[in-house]
Amino acid sequence: MTAQTAQKQNGQKKVKTAVTPTREENFPEWYQNVIKAADMAENAPVRGCMIVKPYGYAVWELFQRELDDRIKNEGVKNAYFPLLIPLSYIAKEAEHIDGFAKECAVVTHHRLEAAPDGKGLVPAGELTEPMIIRPTSETIIGETIAKWVNSYRDLPLKLNQWANVMRWEMRPRLFLRTAEFLWQEGHNAFATAAEANADARRMLEVYAEFARNVMAIPVFEGEKTPEERFPGAAATYTIEAVLQDGKALQSGTSHDLGQTFSRSANIRYQSAEGGEEFAWTTSWGMSSRMIGGLIMTHGDDDGMRMPPKVAPHHVIIIPIIHDDADRAKILDYAETLARRLKDQSIRVDLDASDKKTPDKLWGSIKQGVPVRVEIGRREMEEGNITHTRRDIGRDSKTTESVDVFCNKIAGILEDMQDSMYQQALKRTESMVHDVKSLDEAHQFFAAKDSVGQVRFDAAFLQEEAFEKLMQEFSVTPRCLPFADDGKKVIVGKAY
């Protein structure tokens, strides 16, 4: 059901669409408009940054809660480390700083003073050492772990922090790419290389399960090519989503850092045999860009569609009041239903505002609330409610008793979660195209109507023609999927 059709069915004279343009007409603009229509975020006064509005932040809070539980189940403990990192810490790992140098924001002064001409303020109090606003925290956490680890008995040490980071972004896009963004970063230390690698692989599995079962986003698990590795890592593992426009989104990464950072941070421990050894470390992270992936995976031409597990509201109740004499009774009926649902741990929003009913209905559609409940005089008098699923639309509209609805709502939400994942999975599979040669890959990317990624023999990565392919079409190798034992590679455009 399109917004235009629904407006006609509601008997309104003015015909409009919830989100314009459509995905097919202009996907990037559609994306920005969905965020605006759902009231999730907006651009900040600071270039490249964003303001996450309450509805968007509620999604992040649910994201954080679900992922944090999974991280803690792996024996990881949360901590917090400084926002500012001494330049000397980062400079110790030359390969690491080279990878982030162009993205670093640098603090050089510690106060402001009045300008000499008395107009405005100027930086003053130059720091003895510049500070970097963290682009990631391997260096400062490594320096700290070096103090905490002395013996093999102190290992493994597993830490995670929820924080903001800054990477100077020249082409910002809400949620997907902003100069400042939210994330979690895990940093673990082990006594052996095997333990570290197993941890890096295990945390990727945690991310993949989270993406599929909570965000309802299908992902490919695999290893990055050497050129795409995290700076300083021995191996980088990734989950890659393929969005509705066919571009890939790196959705979570896990790095086997070998002894690179333990050597630069001097993380040593006394082994059981009495010798002194360098630890083996890992790092892994997932960020608020996943909310961008959520929108680009599930949104439709009417706006956002929220998978129930990350929906701020599972159910929105909209009282439909045509006569003020009915107001108190209908609102009381709606509030009683809301309490019953909350008692079942259903997240409920009761819209008792004075907004016009069509605006309430479209507000819930644009925000992607999974289930919309409408209550008017007839429903109240008959002991019923009328509900509609956002993933199906008007075809799911059902009127039934309050008892029946309360007994089935948990099942409805479970079915929606699975249904949305299956829809996304089917689309994702249709967008990854197997080709047998680089010539076929060239033909695919050259065709105007081609959408998606290609998958071919990983041996082709070594051919000179592959470099030309990347340059001509601005494509990159996304990962060597574990499912193909690293023998194939997925290549395409990405965010």
Image: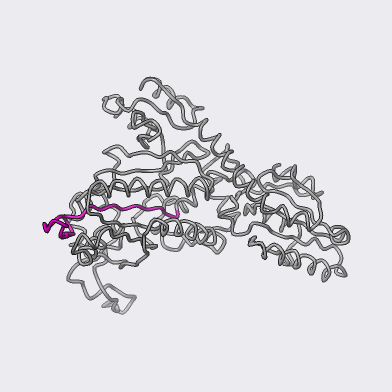
Pick the front one: 352 or 174: 352
On screen, residue 133 above or below 491: below
Pick the front one: 198 or 264: 198
- Residue in the picture at 82% in, 49% down: 11
Pick the front one: 268 or 143: 268
- Residue in the picture at 88% in, 61% down: 381
On screen, residue 418 above or below 338: above
Left-right relation of 73 to 98: right
Residue 281 in magenta stretch: yes
- The x, y position of residue 197, in whole percent, is 28, 46
Left-right relation of 306 to 225: right
Magenta stretch bounds: 264-288
- Outermost residue on the left side: it is 275
- The x, y position of residue 350, in whole percent, is 70, 64
- Residue in the picture at 78% in, 54% down: 404
Give the quadrant of the C terminus: top left
- The x, y position of residue 285, in whole percent, is 37, 53
The tally of labels here is 0
Give the quadrant of the N terminus: top right
Q: Quadrant of residue 479?
A: top left
